[in-house]
Image: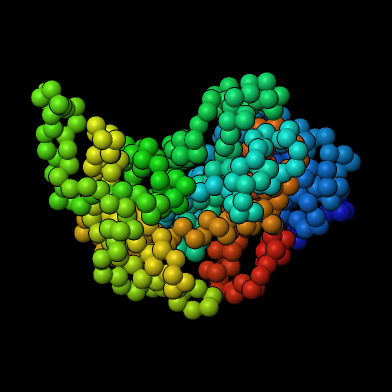
């Protein structure tokens, strides 16, 4: 493929990228899309500034940016087959027993109010409420090797309550109804499972794990999971029993009464024995903290007459006590005989998704898209995930050859490795 003089890749890398992209191009369909997709990925992999369409077109040496813009923003074609190919490629690299699927969200700070999904909401990148877009992300990881497989925009009420605003941003009809982030995540999990993605456990922070509907949704899908929760989450001991109750008139009450009251998760773990466990080696040495775990029944059943949630299923309650003094709390449906070391390793395996978010934004331009449409944003997100997957493939090949990576590398230098 001929590129302008403003941008090029080493000849062997250029050919390697073309070969790796072949399954995506087969799914793209028309010849114009087969030409534009590799150009867009090259623009994301290149250096030289923002990864929005016009600057990339200039660096690629294209006479204009219209064709690149049409490829990324046109709703005339369906990119679902490309998302499926991405899931298949990611599964081939790291999927299977021992892989984990990490659910999270990531914020893209934005100015103005016209870009799809923009509203004042919590932005994790800034650590505060700000004007931003929020994407629900899915990352498949095995050890220190993470790969993104899903990025789906969360639409806040300011959008779902405004049909005209959704229409102007070309939001599909099926996406205009109000959905919580956990609901978006479950839909994305269904999508990647249908594509054949293989993993052993779903992981999520308290933003998702505190939702009983999310946890129950994972159970209905027969998935193992370990999720963060608030320290105030109420739990019962496994010895709790339900006694029949009666109304003041003597009739049987709708819900029974638990024999013991629920207690906050933090209080329940307070009297447990804590053990120091190392879960992996970091760049500055072993990473460890103190952990404790106990079997409990979560207070997420029906409400009784006093407004208290009745006991739900039996789960693991896991506590993490960091040397800084900070404590984190988690729930998991892993088997009763699971060791504390394995429980600790499971809840700490989420760390790699932060690497993905950082590189997608800082090196591959996830937040640089300047269009306003639903289609454009999601297709740009798809192309950044494709570019990331290619970089990870090259890194894995280099590691297999025994080559040492540089301490800190940009996307452009990683491609040249």
Residue 95 shown left or right of residue 382 in the figure: left
Residue farthest to the bottom, as pictured? 285
Residue 159 shows in this picture: yes
The spot of residue 10 in percent (x, y) is 75, 61
The spot of residue 388 in percent (x, y) is 62, 53
Q: Residue at x 88, y 53 (%)?
A: 5
The foreground one among 256 and 37 is 256
Quarter of the rendering occupied by the C terminus: bottom right
The foreground one among 181 and 127 is 127
Q: Quadrant of residue 267?
A: bottom left
Q: Which color scheme does this rendered protein use?
A: rainbow
Residue 26 shows in this picture: no
Residue 247 shown left or right of residue 284 in the figure: left
Q: In this view, does 32 lie above or below 241?
A: above
Q: In this view, does 31 lie above or below 342?
A: above
The foreground one among 120 and 373 is 120
The spot of residue 224 in percent (x, y) is 33, 48
Q: Which residue is drawn at 14% across and 40% down?
A: 242
The spot of residue 11 in percent (x, y) is 75, 59
Residue 364 shown left or right of residue 291 in the figure: right
The foreground one among 203 and 304 is 304
Q: Residue at x 70, y 32 (%)?
A: 373
């Amino acid at each position: 493929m001929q590129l302008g003089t403003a941008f090029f890749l080493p000849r062997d890398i250029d050919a390697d990228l073309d070969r790796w992209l072949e399954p995506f191009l087969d799914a793209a369909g028309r010849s114009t899309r087969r030409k534009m997709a590799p150009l867009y990925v090259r623009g994301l992999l290149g250096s030289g500034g923002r990864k929005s369409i016009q600057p990339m077109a200039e660096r690629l040496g294209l006479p204009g940016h219209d064709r690149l813009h049409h490829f990324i923003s046109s709703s005339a074609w369906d990119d679902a087959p490309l998302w499926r190919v991405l899931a298949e490629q990611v599964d081939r690299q790291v999927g299977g027993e021992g892989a984990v699927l990490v659910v999270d969200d990531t914020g893209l700070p934005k100015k103005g109010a016209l870009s799809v999904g923009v509203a004042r909401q919590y932005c994790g990148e800034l650590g505060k409420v700000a004007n931003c877009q929020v994407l629900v992300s899915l990352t498949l990881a095995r050890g220190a090797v993470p790969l993104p497989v899903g990025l789906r925009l969360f639409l806040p009420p300011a959008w779902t309550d405004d049909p005209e605003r959704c229409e102007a941003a070309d939001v599909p009809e099926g996406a205009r109804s109000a959905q919580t982030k956990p609901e978006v995540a479950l839909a994305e999990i269904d999508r990647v499972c249908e594509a054949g993605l293989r993993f052993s456990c779903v992981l999520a922070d308290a933003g998702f794990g505190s939702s009983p509907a999310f946890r129950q949704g994972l159970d209905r899908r027969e998935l193992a999971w370990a999720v963060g929760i608030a320290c105030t989450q109420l739990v019962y001991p496994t010895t709790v029993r339900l006694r029949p109750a009666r109304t003041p008139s003597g009739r049987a009450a709708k819900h029974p009464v638990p024999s013991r009251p629920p207690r906050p998760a933090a209080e329940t773990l307070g009297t447990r024995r804590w053990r120091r466990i190392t879960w992996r080696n970091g760049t500055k040495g072993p990473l460890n903290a103190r952990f404790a775990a106990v079997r409990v029944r979560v207070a997420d059943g029906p409400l009784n007459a006093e407004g208290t949630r009745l006991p739900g299923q039996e789960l693991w309650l896991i506590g993490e006590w960091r040397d800084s003094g900070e404590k984190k709390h988690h729930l998991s449906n892993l088997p009763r005989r699971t060791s504390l070391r394995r429980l600790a390793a499971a809840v700490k395996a989420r760390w790699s998704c932060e690497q993905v978010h950082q590189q997608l934004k800082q090196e591959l331009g996830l937040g640089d898209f300047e269009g306003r449409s639903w289609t454009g944003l999601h297709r740009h997100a798809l192309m950044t995930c494709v570019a990331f997957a290619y970089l990870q493939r090259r890194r894995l090949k280099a590691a297999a050859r025994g080559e040492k990576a540089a301490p800190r590398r940009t996307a452009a230098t990683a491609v040249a490795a």
